[in-house]
Image (tube, rainbow, N blue to C red):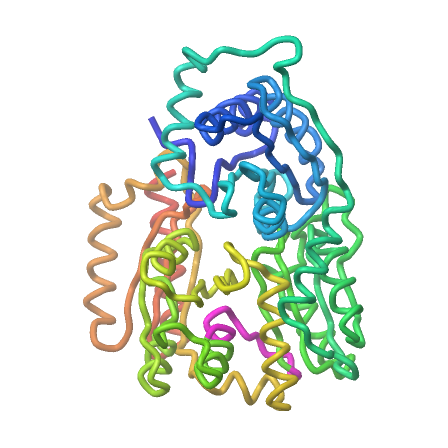
């Protein structure tokens, strides 16, 4: 039986895969497992992104939380990193976010934070899953005064805004910024924060209607932002995803600045200030080879983990590092927050621009991005882990690895959150690697469907 939890919580199409019944059970089991050692009545903060299914799933989840005797605070639409921060600030027992991040609107997800604001370990997720599969066996459900209460606190997002402004207190006066909020959770928080700090702000995709989240906008669709930055003669463009835990940028010429480049820029700035712990940045195996070259040139140690910001975070916590992330724009500034925080990343990047007085294009020159092709192969979700069991696919991968050996690399991996196998090839010739990546992705889809 496939594991219920992926690399970023439980995800699926809302209403069929992620049902209200499952949401309620996750509320029950999650609240029970995360608070069973507590001697007091536990409290859990719940937030969601702008998807139409968010309210439905939030109500089911909160019902589950209250049914095992825990209290719930519903914060409404807030970014994922806001829930992590608020969980710590208010010293509650756990936090839950209902979001499917950058995925299309029909998907949704449920992910938990512990009382310290960190994503759960595999062990705790397995414990929650086991309880659900055993139909909450041996759990005693309270009645009467033992049932939990719900409190509605839609003002909590303002607490997050104040935290962001105090954490990176920069003056953005005179800086023209275009921000793309992906019709998502950052539509209020990022706009107010940047305006409060004095930015000359042009905000796009800030009218979520429940169905337009991530639709041809945000950090997964950058073309409109790139064009707008150029036409508005802006200094920088900032793009968030649906739940605002990731951020990508656009320089003044309309060129994409990805997570690798953002970490290179901010990491070197922190190093010069003596604030990059152990002169190390933690990244994943998907990170561009140019990043490792940058590290050698700048005297920065590059630590690599498997794909997923949770694994980056685990490495950072175990080894005492304070900067890490992914090419996709999940960047963790661990001295400030316990998870990827798109707005925080934007503020740190803008701080480098303001203090160095350099345009983003010049700052991004600190690393050379080697040509890279990333193509998704659509496959049945239950088969995505077993792609190497198909001899035709295994032989094609081996042939590609031999072809690019010494001049690039081939990385194939199943998505942790979607029914996809991701094909990534790095090499010297963009046309060749694009062609080979598409050929292999088409083969994987054809063989596995």
The residue nearer to you, when weighing 117 against 386, is: 117
Residue visible at 20% across and 58% down in the picture: 398
Does residue 425 sit above or below 170 in this rendering? Answer: above
Q: Quadrant of the C terminus?
A: top left
Image spot of residue 86 (x, y percent): 63, 47
Looking at this view, name the residue that lies furthest to the top.
143
Residue visible at 34% across and 87% down in the picture: 297
The residue nearer to you, when weighing 396 against 77, is: 77
Query: What are the residue bounds of the magenta stretch?
Result: 252-263
Tag count: 0
Image spot of residue 72 (x, y percent): 65, 30
Does residue 347 sit above or below 148 in this rendering? Answer: below
Q: Does the magenta run of residues contain 345?
A: no
Q: Which image quadrant is residue 374 in?
A: bottom left
On the picture, is 180 further left or further right than 261? right
On the picture, is 268 further left or further right than 45? left
Q: Quadrant of the N terminus?
A: top left
Q: Which image quadrant is residue 233 in?
A: bottom right
């Amino acid at each position: 039986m496939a594991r219920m939890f992926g690399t970023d919580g439980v995800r699926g199409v809302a209403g069929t895969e992620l049902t209200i019944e499952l949401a309620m059970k996750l509320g029950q089991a999650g609240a029970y497992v995360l608070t069973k050692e507590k001697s007091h009545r536990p409290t859990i903060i719940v937030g969601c992104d702008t998807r139409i299914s968010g309210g439905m799933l939030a109500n089911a989840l909160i019902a589950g939380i209250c049914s095992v005797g825990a209290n719930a605070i519903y914060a409404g639409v807030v970014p994922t990193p806001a829930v992590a921060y608020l969980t710590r600030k208010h010293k509650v027992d756990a936090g839950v976010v209902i979001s499917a991040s950058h995925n299309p609107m029909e998907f949704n997800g449920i992910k938990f934070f512990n009382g310290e604001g960190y994503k759960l370990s595999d062990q705790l997720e397995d414990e929650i899953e086991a309880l659900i599969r055993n139909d909450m066996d041996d759990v005693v459900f309270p009645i009467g005064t033992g049932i939990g209460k719900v409190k509605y606190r839609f003002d909590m997002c303002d607490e997050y805004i104040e935290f962001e402004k105090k954490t990176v207190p920069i003056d953005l006066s005179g800086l023209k910024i275009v921000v793309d909020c992906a019709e998502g959770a950052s539509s209020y928080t990022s706009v107010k924060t940047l305006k409060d700090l004095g930015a000359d702000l042009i905000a796009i995709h800030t009218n979520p209607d429940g169905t337009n989240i991530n639709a041809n906008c945000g950090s997964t669709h950058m073309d409109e932002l790139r064009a707008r930055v150029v036409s508005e003669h802006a200094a920088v463009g900032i793009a968030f995803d649906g739940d605002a835990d990731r951020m990508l940028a656009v320089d003044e010429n309309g060129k994409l600045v990805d997570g690798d480049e953002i970490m290179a820029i901010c990491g070197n700035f922190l190093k010069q200030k003596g604030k990059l712990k152990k002169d190390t940045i933690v990244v994943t195996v998907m990170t561009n080879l140019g990043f490792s070259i940058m590290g050698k040139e700048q005297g920065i140690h590059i630590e690599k983990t498997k794909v997923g910001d949770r694994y980056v975070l685990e490495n950072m916590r175990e080894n005492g590092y304070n900067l890490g992330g992914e090419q996709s724009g999940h960047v963790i500034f661990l001295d400030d927050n316990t998870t990827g925080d798109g707005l925080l990343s934007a503020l740190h990047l803008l701080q480098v621009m303001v203090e160095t007085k350099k345009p983003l294009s010049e700052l991004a020159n600190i690393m050379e991005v080697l040509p890279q092709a990333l193509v998704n192969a659509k496959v049945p979700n239950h088969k995505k882990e077993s792609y190497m069991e198909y001899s035709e696919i295994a032989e094609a991968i081996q042939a590609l690895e031999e072809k690019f050996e010494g001049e690039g690399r081939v990385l194939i991996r199943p998505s942790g959150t979607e029914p996809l196998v991701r094909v990534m090839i790095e090499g010297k010739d963009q046309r060749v690697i694009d062609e080979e990546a598409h050929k292999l992705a088409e083969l994987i889809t054809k063989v596995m469907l």
